[in-house]
Amino acid sequence: MPERIVECIPNFSEARRPEVVEALMQAIAATPGVALLDRHSDLDHNRTVLTFAGSPEGVEEAAFRSIALAAELVDLDKHTGEHPRIGATDVVPFVPISGVSMQDCVAMAVRLGQRVGQELGIPVYLYEEAATRPERKNLEDVRRGQYEGLKEEITVKPERLPDFGPARLGTAGATVIGARHPLIAYNVYLTSDDVTVAQKIAKAIRHSSGGLRFVKGLGLLVDGRAQVSMNLTNYRQTPISRVMALIRSEAARYGVSVHHSELVGLIPQEALIDAAVWHLQLDQFSAEQVLERRLEAAWQAQAAGLPVSFLEALASSSPAPGGGSASAYSGAAAAALVAMVARLTIGRKKYAAVEGRMQEILSRAEALRSSLADAVEQDAEAFRGVMAAFQLPKNTPQEQETRAAAIESATLRAIHVPLEVARQTVEVMGLAVEAVCEGNLNAISDAATAAALAQAALTGAGFNVRINVISLKERSKGQAWLDELLALEARAAELFEKVRKALIERGGMPLA
């Protein structure tokens, strides 16, 4: 699992054409560094919510690809559905999950908004934490009037001008992009087909009309049944159990009850545990009493000692992780050894003259170790992206064109990851040379081993760069990368020769 994780939950104005939804899912899944987690399509809403997560760079790219594809496949002039909408891709929120701040997600929203506006010509409004003005913080305010109303107002009302993109709507409409905290999209169905009852209950529970804090709600008619459709924007402050209790109470006033409820997308485990504790009236309960949580903690502790899971995955019949991931892992191990030698040198009187430089080497080696460790999964994800692209449908000329573009894009990613590994491992070799020549003599063989592992990592990464370059539709695109790789290999050979000489002269090793 990458250390930095962002979640994205785009809402697309399409659910009735499965082939369109499938194409959107494939575009996201084919993006390196991203995992598609969930799909929820509602035919009455004519709306699909996709949930995916991964590295910030991968998630941002996947969001752009899906917005571009939705603009091609969804025509808002022909779209109908119960749910309010202003765009083919209606809303795109980024949510920080791990190792990422809210400000990082705001920056992602701004970059994506600029790109969508400039490259796709789609008006973009920033909302929630990324909002540029207070009146655009709430999604419902931005979406006021829906597509039809915005189409008229965007050209004549200054307050409706987008943050990015043109002041006019095409058939893809406009897109709302932002950053927010995790929320729960939750729908409750009533034992009635009277939509006015759902609307009255929604008014009673939502914060904007005096109801519960952190609850947004609408009353709709879905599948012939009255539905209270909600977003719970802070499940810690307003638990889902409290919301359901109030809905039951309000429904009883109108002689109806709750038929069933549903989640749209994913829900944090903590929210379900809180609901269970409330309904079961558990006393002195701890989340650590959940079996799966205790098992996960045990596995993580075990994995901290030795990365058995990676080695087992490498030995399995699955093609990913493969040689590229193993190369990145070797590079990370090389950087770790350099860091060890630096630590064994720092603080020793005998090496006081080089202590300052060893501090610098330690800092850089640790940064490279972290980056190369991340590349282990990035390389595997890049390969999975290539495989996913090859699995895209190719029944029509349009599908063939989309598939070819996805394959080319995924192949480029499969080049970039090992090429960056190659660059970083040569840098590790440079640090290893200094450790061999100036570091603690008692650890000279460890520093030399670091150089050897870095050399192996470079060789393996080079194989992966080359095999993917020859897969490009236009081989000439990859010539510059091949030239860079040759230069890196020449530099590595020079560095390794310095290591060999230092082992002979400083270490007294009998090398041929």
Image: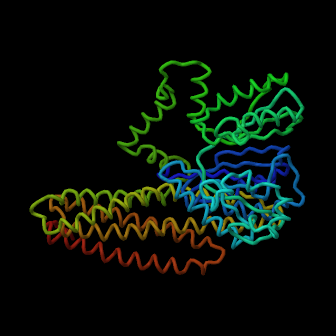
Q: What is the x, y in percent for residue 158?
A: 75, 68
Residue 177 as seen in the image, left or right of residue 166: left
Residue 411 as seen in the image, left or right of residue 254: left
Q: How is the image coloured?
A: rainbow
In the picture as drawn, the residue positioned furthest to the front comes out as 210
Residue 182 as seen in the image, left or right of residue 44: left
Q: Quadrant of residue 237?
A: top right
The residue depicted at 52 percent of the width and 58 percent of the height is 104
Q: Quadrant of the C terminus?
A: bottom left
222, above or below 63, in the image: above
In the picture as drawn, the residue positioned furthest to the left comes out as 350
The residue depicted at 16 percent of the width and 67 percent of the height is 510
The residue depicted at 63 percent of the width and 50 percent of the height is 52
Residue 59 as seen in the image, left or right of residue 206: left
476, above or below 133, in the image: below
Q: What is the x, y in percent for residue 133?
A: 64, 60
Q: What is the x, y in percent for residue 154?
A: 80, 66
Nearer to me, 375 or 145: 145
Q: What is the x, y in percent for residue 33?
A: 56, 57
132, above or below 504, in the image: above
